[in-house]
Image: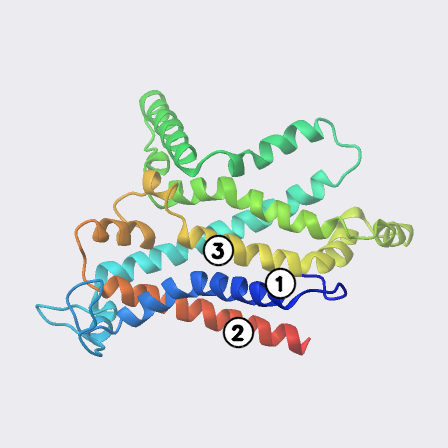
């Protein structure tokens, strides 16, 4: 809605209703699952049976809370570790790729850029299957011809990192490249005229300018990795990530401990968002 243009009361009220319904659609599922995390019931859904903290702290034969569920805690740790490693790799490679594609004299720039963004176009299921088949084939060749243990190419932690890195680096490259387009190249030229090397000009001028985008790219790729399921499900080994563990449990009508996990994730993300909002306003 453009504030400078005149509008009728019907238009204003309709706009307010639309905004209210939009945010209800976004918030209501999160609010519902957060409330059900405290439901004193052995079922994952309604009706409400009373307030209880059992799904966080219970450790009995009938109920095992989140903080006593070793499998869930292990899957959370694996997801955090996977997301951290993938985010670091994606941010580093994405920064280098963004700097490379901003070069004017770059042979096959358009052709390579198309392949760089291809993982965002290909469905995650297809991407996961193709990485699994390719890695298995390469691992078998290495084992048969060179008699080397190629467990790196088997489903497991590093294959999950590799699969998520294939699209995480693209997200980082696009985010950092968007900020790099606003960079004034004369700043680097001035540094070079003062006898700075190319690497020095990038390290002392370009990277500080890109720092907000680099931090943002790390955060986005971390969250994408932590919540990814459709690619990870094909690459995970005996140690599942949190989304895979939750999916395997929900198939068999698991207890509301999954609601407790969801509530903790929503709480942590909300706190981080509030801190980021506070820091942005302060700056």
- Relative to the observer, which residue lies in front, 3 or 226? 3
Extreme top residue here?
145
In the figure, residue 4 lies in which quadrant?
bottom right
Please give the residue where the numbered disc 1 appears in the rendered image: 11
Instruction: Please tell me how crowded label 2 is: few (under 14), some (14-19), or many (20+) other residues with Cα within 10 Å.
Output: few
Q: Which badge, 2 or 3, is on the more N-terminal residue?
A: 3
Front: mark 1 or 3: 1
- Relative to the observer, which residue lies in front, 95 or 13? 13
Extreme left residue here?
61
Question: Quadrant where the N terminus lies?
Answer: bottom right
Q: Which badge, 1 or 2, is on the more N-terminal residue?
A: 1
- Relative to the observer, which residue lies in front, 139 or 216? 216
Please give the residue where the numbered disc 2 appears in the rendered image: 274
Left or right for 211, reference 25: right
Q: Which badge, 1 or 3, is on the more N-terminal residue?
A: 1
Q: Position of residue 52 (x, y in %)?
A: 21, 78
Q: Which mark is residue 222?
A: 3
Q: Position of residue 85 (x, y in %)?
A: 46, 52
Q: Position of residue 106 (x, y in %)?
A: 75, 32
Describe the element under mark 3 as helix, strand or loop. Answer: helix
Instruction: Please tell me how crowded label 3 is: few (under 14), some (14-19), or many (20+) other residues with Cα within 10 Å.
Output: many
User: Between marks 1 and 2, how big is the CA–CA gap?
Assistant: 32 Å
Front: mark 2 or 3: 2
Describe the element under mark 1 as helix, strand or loop. Answer: helix
Describe the element under mark 2 as helix, strand or loop. Answer: helix
């Amino acid at each position: 809605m453009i504030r400078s243009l005149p509008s009728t009361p019907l238009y204003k009220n309709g706009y307010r209703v639309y905004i209210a319904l939009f945010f209800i659609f976004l918030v209501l599922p999160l609010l519902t699952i957060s409330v059900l995390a405290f439901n004193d019931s052995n079922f994952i859904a309604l009706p409400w049976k009373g307030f209880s903290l059992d799904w966080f702290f219970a450790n009995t034969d009938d109920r095992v809370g989140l903080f006593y569920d070793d499998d869930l805690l292990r899957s959370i740790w694996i997801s955090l570790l996977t997301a951290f490693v993938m985010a670091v790799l994606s941010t580093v490679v994405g920064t280098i790729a963004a700097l490379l594609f901003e070069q004017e004299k770059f042979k096959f720039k358009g052709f390579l850029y198309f392949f760089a963004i291809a993982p965002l176009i290909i469905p995650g299921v297809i991407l996961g299957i193709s990485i699994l088949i390719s890695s298995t084939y390469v691992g078998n060749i290495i084992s048969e011809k060179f008699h080397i243990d190629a467990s790196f190419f088997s489903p497991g932690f590093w294959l999950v990192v590799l699969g998520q890195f294939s699209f995480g680096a693209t997200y980082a490259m696009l985010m950092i490249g968007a900020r790099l387009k606003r960079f004034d190249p004369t700043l680097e030229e001035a540094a070079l005229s003062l006898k700075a090397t190319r690497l020095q000009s990038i390290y002392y001028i370009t990277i500080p300018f890109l720092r907000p985008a680099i931090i943002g790219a790390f955060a986005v790729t971390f969250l994408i990795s932590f919540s990814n399921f459709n690619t990870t499900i094909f690459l995970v080994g005996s140690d599942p990530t949190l989304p895979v563990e939750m999916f395997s449990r929900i198939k068999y009508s698991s207890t509301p401990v999954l609601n407790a996990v969801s509530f903790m994730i929503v709480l942590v993300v909300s706190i981080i968002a509030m801190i980021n909002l506070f820091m942005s306003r302060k700056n």
